[in-house]
Image (cartoon, rainbow, N blue to C red):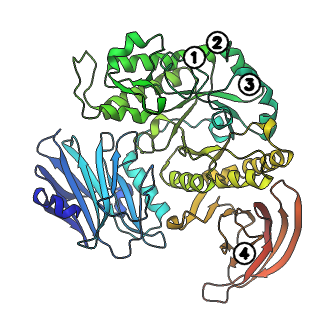
Amino acid sequence: MLLDHFKDMLHEGQSLGATWIMHSDGLTIETTCEDGPASKGIVFDVTAANPGATATIVIGKPLGSIQRFHMVGSRCREPLPADWAGVTQVSLVNSAPMGCMVDDADRNVLSFAYSFAQDEITMRYGVDEEHVLFVVMLQIQRVPGHSRLLLMDDGLPLDETMRLLVEWVADGSAPLPMADKALEPVFSTWYAYLQNVDAETLGRELDGMSRLGCGSIFIDDGWQQYGSGRGYSGCGDWVPDPVKFPDMRATVRRFQDAGVGVVLWIAPLLLGEKAHVFKTLERYAPIHDDGLGRQFHVLDPRRKAVRDYIGGVCARMAKDYGIAGLKIDFLEQAGAYQGQPLENPEPGDVTDVGEAMRLMLERIKTMLIENCVPVVEFRQPYSSPVIAPYSNIVRASDCPADALTNRIRTIDERLAAGNRVVHGDMLLWDVNAGAETCAAQILASFFAVPQISVPPSAMSNGQYESCRFLLSLWRKHRNVLLNGRLQPVSSILGYPLVHAFDGNGTQVSGVYAPDMIIDVDADTRTLIILNASTENNVTIRLRGDGGTVKLTGHAYDCTGAITMQFEEDTDTFRENGDATITTIPVPTYGILELALER
């Protein structure tokens, strides 16, 4: 359908085997040579006769063994949508112009990346039922004079392919330095309190969150003046509510003295009519959103006055409160100005929203670095490699109490994060449920940094012990979990099995579905298995040269109580030999820790 609908405006172009490229008038697409990640594929130079005009590039691939289309920042509702259904508005703050078509073993059938990842592009994609093809169409709103297109069909695993694509699109851009606090578990106030947050309540929870091992507290929406009622009519001043937080600097200092950094939420593009600066900035915020009672205007980042104001606000917050970081939200609202005329431009204004957002984020970054504020959190879908230099945390987008979605989003984001650390969405569970309910949420985000959002004082004893035990285990193996080689299994099934390896003999494997077999190399020295399935056991298969490996260790329930001591000599097997399968009792949402000795 997609090809037939646009066929009159497209011309045949280059090809890569059975893959072909089509393009609109005014574009020339030619192969070129390039080193680095592109050596795994072919790079095409894209030249526009009319820079700034609209342009279209189409990539077509015979369906063959393609089973899923993997994107950045958001997951398709269906593994293979029809081409009339798949569409995403790609921009600096939403997804990226890249993707990977994979087979049922998560091998790359065809992947692509387009270098112009700053401005808005409408990306259409899906199965063309008339021609039995998978088609990707990039509809570029303002094509640059020169850009590049990378195609790879090398059959590499999805994780390796995504690493190469991300590296190519990032093109050597310097990352924001990593912050120690970004690598520690977080207590987030959002699901715990929503906007009903105050310094006194948080102070009562400080000891409990410290004993859990939370290295920072993210004070979310509600700390600011007029921050109540789930609306945003007070946004814009970014000063504390005088009743909730009468002395923000003293609150920050109290937490810092306990070793807990404070990160404040800010939505810099939102302007509410209650804000003191509303009358000053109203003319720079002509678009209004009152849907769902949210009641805010959107500041236009194309305006230099807006970028100067936001940069000044971030600098003031850093100086006045001594915070450890900012949680920057609602950046996608800038898309409201895409394609809108800029009325009465002033000196320093720019017409392109993508360029305006880059300038705004660069200004914020400079202000924070100058004021020694090391932590900056974005959330999905701010996932583009081009936006990565402006934050060191990217968090899975909101999915309250949905452990499955949280796992999928964190692993998806790990494949695209580059030098950023991935945090799971804030963890929420029913405090009247069992300890296993708490454990299910934590284990779902174990291959990212967990963010707890249940008040410690509200947890049952079992939940608190489960949280304490699992976060302690996470910190113990943080290096392999965050920095090791991530190997997720079966993206099409939502990663029912996930491995991480540190290269020094440690393997951590998360089991999220029944009947999973965990392959373990005989040279492994430490094996940790997270049993987040419904079964009361885990099954391992030792791969080796046929020799014997001694397994010793313990199984724990989700609160850290030892349920079994294990010791067994197990034969390994060669690829062509008989498999040696060992099944070990481990409680549901429990942990198995084994030492291996040859």
Number of marks in the rendered image: 4
- Residue drawn 84% across and 55% down? 560
Q: Which residue is mark 3?
A: 255
**In front of the other: label 3 or label 2?**
2
Between residue 132 and residue 345, name the one nearer to us: 132
Q: Secondary structure at mark 3?
A: helix
Using residue 589 as the reference point, say whether residue 482 is left or right of it: left
Q: Which residue is mark 2?
A: 242
Q: Amino acid at mark 3?
A: Phe
Q: Quadrant of residue 82?
A: bottom left
In the rendered image, which quarter contains the C terminus?
bottom right
Alpha-carbon distance for marks 3 and 1?
21 Å
**Compared to 551, does 435 lie above or below?**
above
**Secondary structure beneath label 2:** loop
Q: Residue at x 63, y 60 (%)?
A: 500
Whole-angstrom CA distance, mark 2 to mark 4, is 56 Å
Ranked by sequence position, the earlier of labels 3 and 2 is 2
Q: Secondary structure at mark 1?
A: loop
Residue 150 in the figure: left or right of residue 372? left
Which of disc 4 and disc 2 is earlier in sequence?
Answer: 2
Query: What is the C-alpha distance between the residues marked 3 and 2?
Result: 19 Å
* Residue 8 versus residue 396 in the image, above or below: below
Residue type at numbered disc 2: Pro
The residue singled out by tag 1 in the image is 225
User: Which of the pair 436/363 is nearer the observer?
Assistant: 436
Q: Quadrant of residue 76?
A: bottom left
User: Distance from label 4 to label 1 (Cα)?
Assistant: 54 Å
**Amino acid of disc 4:** Thr
